[in-house]
Image (cartoon, rainbow, N blue to C red):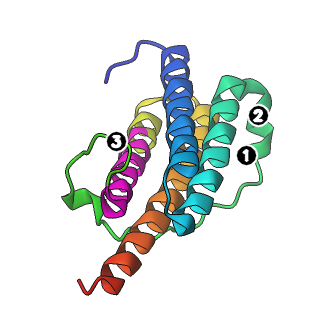
Amino acid sequence: MDFETIEDIITYAVAKEKEAAEFYENLSKNEEFSVAKKTFAEFAIEERKHEALFADLGNNLAKLENYEYKWIPDIKRSNYMTELTYEPGMAYVDILRMAMKREEQALQFYNDIGAKVQDEQFIKACKFLAQEEAKHKNILETIYDDHMAQMGD
């Protein structure tokens, strides 16, 4: 995806974070998997925070000054999966696959955009958000692995 300005990137990122928050809010309200409901609700809250960060980036950059970046392991389960479209009542394992893929794409977006811009403050925001998406991806891939192990796979 090509952007002409940082403002274009911000507009796109805000829209994607809003979409992600709505996705997780929908899952936490409408799906019957109690274990995942809490995780999805927490992800929705975090995605709303990401949306707010980019929506008012200038005033939020100070919050990132003392952020400690940590290495997040990448299990890479989603790297070998295809995209799915959400349908109410879809299988739990498919919901996990879809959510993992979405987080993988968000992680890649922030890594790619951060590598293309020159603004140091904007790069910090991209690194922060990439790390946040990596955390989500790792949590989902771990839940997926645990679920598949319980199913005998």
Q: Depth check: 5 or 107 in front?
A: 107
Give the residue displayed 48% in from the left and 30% down from the top: 16
Q: Depth check: 30 or 6 in front?
A: 30
- What is the C-alpha distance between the residues marked 2 and 1? 7 Å
The kind of residue on which mark 3 rests is: Tyr
Query: Which callout, 3 or 1, points at the residue further toward the start of the chain?
Result: 1
Element type where label 3 sits in the image: loop
- The magenta segment is 91-109
Q: Residues within 10 Å of mark 2 (few under 14, many from 20)?
A: some
Q: Depth check: 83 or 12 in front?
A: 83
- Residue underneath mark 2: 60
Give the residue displayed 55% in from the left and 69% down from the top: 35
Q: Is residue 79 left or right of residue 32?
A: left
Q: Residues within 10 Å of mark 1 (few under 14, many from 20)?
A: some
- Residue underneath mark 1: 64
- What is the C-alpha distance between the residues marked 3 and 2? 32 Å
Residue 78's image quarter? bottom left
The kind of residue on which mark 2 rests is: Asn
Mark 2 touches mark 1? (CB < 8 Å): yes
Single out the mark in the foreground, 3 or 2. Answer: 3
Q: Point out which mark residue 86 bears.
A: 3
Give the residue displayed 52% in from the left and 24% down from the top: 15
